[in-house]
Image (cartoon, rainbow, N blue to C red):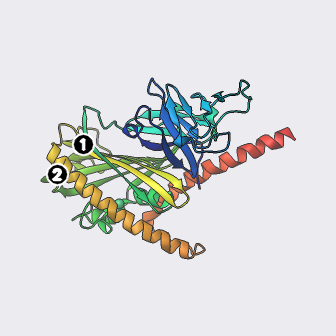
Amino acid sequence: MWVRNAWYVAGWSHELAAGKVIARSIINEPLALYRTQDGTAVAFEDRCCHRFAPLSKGRVEQDDLRCMYHGLKFAPDGRCIEIPGQALIPQSAAVRRYPTAESGSWVWVWMGDAAQADPTLVPPSIALSDPGHRLKAGQMDYEADYQLIDDNLLDLSHLSYAHEKTLGLGSPEWANERPRITRLDRGVRVERWLRNQVRGYVRNETYDMWNAYDFLVPGIFLMRTAWYAPGTADRLQLKPPTEPPVFLRCDEQAVTPTTARTSRYFFATGARSGDIDPQQLERMYGVVAAAFAEDKDIIEAQQIVIDRDPTRRMLPTSFDAGPTQFRRVLEEMVARETQAPQRAMAVAE
Ligand code: FES
Ligand SMILES: [Fe+2]
């Protein structure tokens, strides 16, 4: 199930080097990406309109991309502007161009109706180079439906078990306490207090932690964990804090469906630059990377079991409020997208 009218992360900004063209797949649609001379990211369907050679094997020429099979050249808007040895360029000589945006440290591609591509809908992630933060990034490829990864991120109760030796070490509260979940326009917000927590890989002290994240379509996870002196959660009667934390951890992640059964997972972890030194960040990243390998292991195994008999129904528990609400958001958006063309056809008839 794919929403089309959404910004998908195609890759890190640094992956898209000047003068290079790279191949990506998003919701099973192959793309060729490159930059114009002013740095603007361009995303084309990865198929030359001539004889369907992939444009990702093409060559960047100033602002344009030339197919390196027979040499048709395309402007950044997708129009063919040169056919070697032929003066007349037919109107139909063009490739599909997808809207792009660049924000935080990600290149985003809008996979749906270009007229609806709204740059204000790009989720607000922190750039890796942001001077106010110290972040470290990674990524991994999954042999699984992206929705299983979304589900995982929307239900952090699994930290106490899947990550009992890493992120969830000594922290049964993840599984034992239920977060508050609020519906947003294009996602859900998940918030909770975790009392008396120790994150020894950063600091060997006890804190109350306010853990809050927005999870936005298609799978963008923007989490802040604000650390306070023990007792703060009770003093605030478990209400959201307004006072400044002693430590602010930041986790930014994006899940991109590449095909129906493969996904790419982008992540960065860190904190405000004054809160964490490079060694602490390395240790934190090491724990995060180990935890994400644990997620990949269990989710890919889960996918195999699901595919063995897709008719079997899962058993919902109170853990699943986040995943369930988010799937509802996706379903409603997909329903609106599929009904809109039908309504337009009905009016035309
Ligand atoms: S296939 Fe691209 S120029 Fe022929
Ligand atoms: Fe996890």
* 144 sits to left or right of 50: left
Residue projecting furthest to the right: 349
Q: Toward the viewer: 14 or 234?
A: 14
In this view, 264 is above or below 89 = below
Three-letter code for the amino acid on which mark 1 is drawn: Ala
**Quadrant of the rendered image holding ligand 2:** bottom left
Q: Secondary structure at mark 1?
A: strand
Q: From mark 2 to mark 1, how far is it between C-alphas?
A: 10 Å
Estimate the x, y position of residue 100 in percent, counting from the top left.
52, 34
Estimate the x, y position of residue 42 in percent, counting from the top left.
52, 33
Quadrant in which the N terminus appears: bottom right
Which is nearer the N-term, disc 2 or disc 1?
Answer: 2
The residue that disc 1 covers is 271
Quadrant in which the C terminus appears: top right
Disc 2 crowd rating (10 Å Cα; few below 14, some 14-19, many 20+) is some
Q: Is residue 265 visible?
A: yes
> Which residue occupies 36% across, 63% down?
295
Estimate the x, y position of residue 300 in percent, counting from the top left.
44, 67
